[in-house]
Image (cartoon, rainbow, N blue to C red):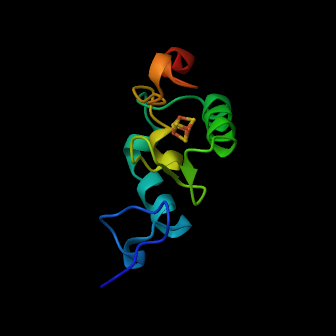
Amino acid sequence: MQTAKRGACKGCGPEYQVNDEYIQRVLSHPMFSSEHCVPEEVYQQRLAICQACPKLQDGISCSVCGCIIPVAAKLKARGCPLPGGGLWGTADAE
Ligand code: SF4
């Protein structure tokens, strides 16, 4: 039986670990250079907030919503899933 790392996703093994190469490949899609995305300054603010959050796993995944943060934080329509409006959200995307 495979033992999941404490706090790691229960559904995926280490062979599915997201890495920088995967993230860069996703972000190279034209969708991530479009009107659907936040300005670079907002993106960096969102990443900084997540980096300081105890819900971030392995510096990449949000343990609340399961999102890959370097990808999700690019999108205007996304927001932090924490109750009460989250730590960042769609309001900062305009
Ligand atoms: S999206 Fe919100 S809950 Fe998830 S890691 Fe970022 S700040 Fe934390």
Give residue 5's position: percent from left, percent from top.
48, 71
Residue 53 percent coordinates (x, y)? 64, 40
Up/down of 50 relative to 14, above or below: above
- Quadrant of the rendered image containing residue 75: top left
Residue 74's place in the image compared with 92, above or below, is: below
Q: Quadrant of residue 55?
A: top right
Horizontal arrangement in the rendering, residue 2 relative to residue 25 (left or right): left
Residue at the image position 30 percent from the left and 85 percent from the top? 1
Up-down: is 58 above or below 5? above
Ligand 1's quadrant is: top right
In this view of the protein, which residue sits in the foreground, 32 or 71?
71
**Residue at (37% x, 72% y) in the render:** 16
Q: Position of residue 88 (x, y in %)?
A: 56, 25
Q: Residue 42's x, y, as percent?
A: 63, 28
* Circle count: 0
* Observer-nearest of 85 and 70: 85
Q: Front-most of 57 and 44?
A: 57
Left or right of 14? Residue 10 is left
Q: Residue at x 63, y 35 (%)?
A: 40
